[in-house]
Amino acid sequence: MDFNSIQEIAGREPVFETGLLLAGRVDPANVRRQLSRLVASGRLIQLRRGLYALAPPFQKVRPHPFLIANRMVRASYVSRQSALEYYGLIPEHVPVVTSATTSRPWRRETPLGTFEYRHIKPDFFHGYRTVELTEGQAALVATPEKALLDLLYLQPASDSLEYLAELRLESLEGLDLNELRRLAESSGNAKLRRGTGLIEEMARDETGEYESL
């Protein structure tokens, strides 16, 4: 199987797995050897074992970073700073795509971006939804409220005004405060309840005094 054949089969896929190329009468060992050669030549990008993307000069579809994050680790959803930026809750660009997973913590740097995964307990693996990113691409992304709770859960000393002020949270009027409080209470985590209480105060503060802390 040559590069033209791979382009024809996978060219309109943002990312693809080896199995896509193994249908029909093909030699699996030959396909894997060809994939290795194409990665070495820079025409393919290996995102993880068995997952690839065409290099930018050959892409017909540009993969969204959130889609890549989901596909690199199946038991994951985009959360924390990346989700907060997506929803317009923090002003800064986040250069690393941050996700929550029930698998082990992991970080991977690729030509298509850097991806970081933090472990959460299985009973905390909820509060995400399917988001349409671009035509034909979707990903699992935490709700705004769960993204905040994931950040509080995983970041040391995050239940303080000093830390929350450093985040420069904005557009808090768009938060569902009842849902935020419900998630914090159902977690049984005192730190999340404290942090949520501070965020509720921020959302209701019309003077913006917390920004000067």
Image (cartoon, rainbow, N blue to C red):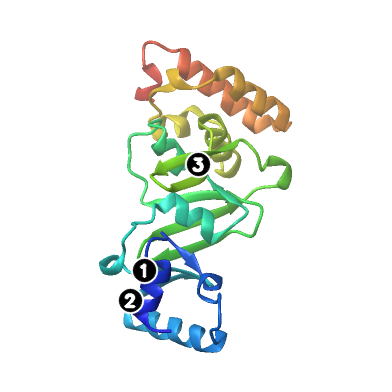
According to the image, label 3 marks what residue?
Answer: 80
In the picture, the quarter occupied by the N terminus is bottom left
Q: Under tag 2, what secondary structure?
A: loop
Return the disc, 3 or 2, that comes first in the chain's sequence. 2
State which mark lies toward you, 3 or 1: 1
Return the disc, 1 or 2, that comes first in the chain's sequence. 2
Viewer-closest of 200 and 47: 47
Q: Residues within 10 Å of mark 1 (few under 14, many from 20)?
A: many
Q: Is residue 53 left or right of residue 32?
A: left
Q: Position of residue 44 (x, y in %)?
A: 37, 74
According to the image, label 1 marks what residue?
Answer: 54
State which mark lies toward you, 3 or 2: 2
Q: Under tag 3, what secondary structure?
A: helix
Q: Residues within 10 Å of mark 2 (few under 14, many from 20)?
A: some
Q: Decide: marks 1, 2 in contact (CB < 8 A)?
A: yes
Q: Is residue 152 left or right of residue 92?
A: right
Q: Position of residue 79 (x, y in %)?
A: 51, 43
Residue at 36%, 72% (x, y): give it. 7
Q: Under tag 1, what secondary structure?
A: strand
Q: Position of residue 58 (x, y in %)?
A: 29, 69
According to the image, label 2 marks what residue?
Answer: 43
Residue at 51%, 83% (x, y): give it. 32
Return the disc, 3 or 1, that comes first in the chain's sequence. 1
Viewer-closest of 38 and 27: 27
